[in-house]
Amino acid sequence: MNRSPILLYAEDERLVGELPEQLRLDGYDPHIAQARKQCLWALGERRPAALLLGEVPTLATTLELLRELRACECDVDPDVPVLVLSGGQDALCQVAAFDAGADDVQSADVSYLVLRARLRVLIERGGLARRPRQAEVRSLRIDSDRREVRYAGEPIELTNIEFALLTQLASSPGRLFTKHELQRDVWGSPGGAGPRSRALDAHLSRLRRKLAVAGAEGAIENRRGTGYRLGLVEPDAAAAA
């Protein structure tokens, strides 16, 4: 079985060049996607260790794809590390890529040795290592590999964004996560007031209702105007007290 990290490279075939073969010689298993739907399908099916994202076919399209990925609007792992290869040297384009959720941005003509080193760092330190693959807080169990949530053994059906929010909160039970942190780390955008902040509250409100229906009422606490935390005690016991 090939256990090499899978790298997904999404770009016009004419611009790929020798990169896939270079990666293959270094022990990686590159998969080339040349269209948005193909890219999203491969992200969901292959669960790559990192995404090497070129311009598909323009920077604007690349940013749109990246925002969709980070916003959990598709059935893929929103934590996959992403390195964007930009054809331009414009600092504003690089900033736009970071704002959209890129972990690293490099020029398309970067040397292969530098690119390989950047990818290695992303794979070792980023994405898959950011959050525990399994988390258990009292009767609440989260399995990121299976993308399952259970309370007292019973499954809870969550959307991608709800799952990502719960996983983030469960990564440090009892800690208060500010809205800024949740928007940045889960939603994939800077924190602050406005439509995005209200959307975040709406997702968390639905998540709390689903947990309550499952018997975990009060598991997620809302500090109005500040943020959210996952309680350390059994919700039922807290309610009884």
Image (tube, rainbow, N blue to C red):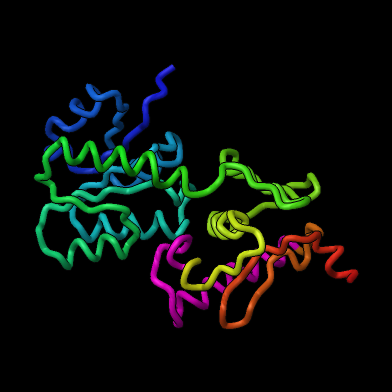
Front residue of 237/147: it is 237
On the picture, is 106 further left or further right than 37? left
173 lies above or below 132: below
Main SS class of the magenta portion in the image: helix
Q: Which residues are magenta?
A: 183-211
Q: Where residue 194 sits in the image (x, y, percent)?
A: 44, 82
Tell which residue pokes out farthest to the right in this image.
240
* Of 230 and 209, the residue lying toward us: 230
Residue lying at the far top of the rendered structure? 1
Q: Position of residue 39 (x, y in %)?
A: 34, 43
**What is the number of callouts on the image?**
0
| Residue at image location 57% in from the left, 74% down from the top | 227
Report x, y in % for residue 30.
29, 30
Q: Quadrant of residue 8?
A: top left
User: Where the C terminus falls, by quadrant?
Assistant: bottom right
Q: Is residue 182 left or right of residue 37?
A: right
Residue at coordinates 45% horizontally, 41% vertically from top-left? 44
Q: Position of residue 204 (x, y in %)?
A: 61, 68
Residue 204 on the magenta segment: yes
Q: Vertically, is 90 above or below 131? A: below
Q: Is residue 139 left or right of residue 118?
A: right
Q: Quadrant of the N terminus?
A: top left
Residue 203 as seen in the image, left or right of residue 71: right
Q: Is residue 170 magenta?
A: no
Rendered view: 121 above or below 231 = above
